Amino acid sequence: MKIKLTKRLKIIFLIVAVLIGSLYYIWYQDDLGAHGRLYPSKQKMCMEFALSYLRTIQKVEPNFDDQKWQRAIAIESDLYNLCQSELTDEALENFETKNIRLYLDEYRSK
């Protein structure tokens, strides 16, 4: 048994498909906004967060120069390391801002 789709039926199917697609897109955007973006791995999330920090800080920090760039890299590195750390009390207690301290030590020695 072969079903012959008339032009009117094809248009109805197209409208229904567009409506379902639109509703799914609206739901997806609401979910993304409410729950944030999901990443395939913790490493990927931390890397994108760190790179996003560097790109953003360049645009929003007034009078951005080489010295501020070095500070931003030190902060970004420690943010990345913190993001990679385990979610245990011990790991958080032992976390140190090594890159920021290294930057400050170099700055103070000048």
Image (spheres, rainbow, N blue to C red):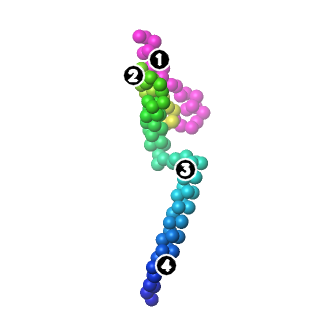
Instruction: Compute the Cα span from label 4 to label 2.
Output: 64 Å
Relative to residue 32, is residue 78 depicted above or below?
A: above
Measured as percent of width and height from the top left, residue 94 is found at 55, 27
Q: Quadrant of residue 23?
A: bottom right
From where the camera sits, is residue 9 visible?
yes
Is tag 1's residue or tag 4's residue first in the polypeptide sequence?
4
- Please, what is the dominant secondary structure of the magenta stretch? helix
Disc 2 residue type (three-letter): Asp
Measured as percent of width and height from the top left, residue 15 is found at 51, 70
Q: Name the residue under label 4.
A: 9
Mark 2, residues whose alpha carbon is within 10 Å: few (<14), some, or many (≥20)?
A: few
Q: What element carries label 1?
A: helix
Mark 1, residues whose alpha carbon is within 10 Å: few (<14), some, or many (≥20)?
A: few
Q: Residue at x 45, y 79 (%)?
A: 7
Is tag 4's residue or tag 2's residue first in the polypeptide sequence?
4
Q: Mark 1 points at which residue?
A: 104
Q: Is mark 3 on a helix, strand or loop?
A: helix
Q: Name the residue under label 2.
A: 66
Is tag 1's residue or tag 2's residue first in the polypeptide sequence?
2
Highlighted range, magenta: 85-110
Relative to residue 109, is residue 10 depicted above or below?
A: below
Disc 4 residue type (three-letter): Leu
Disc 3 residue type (three-letter): Leu
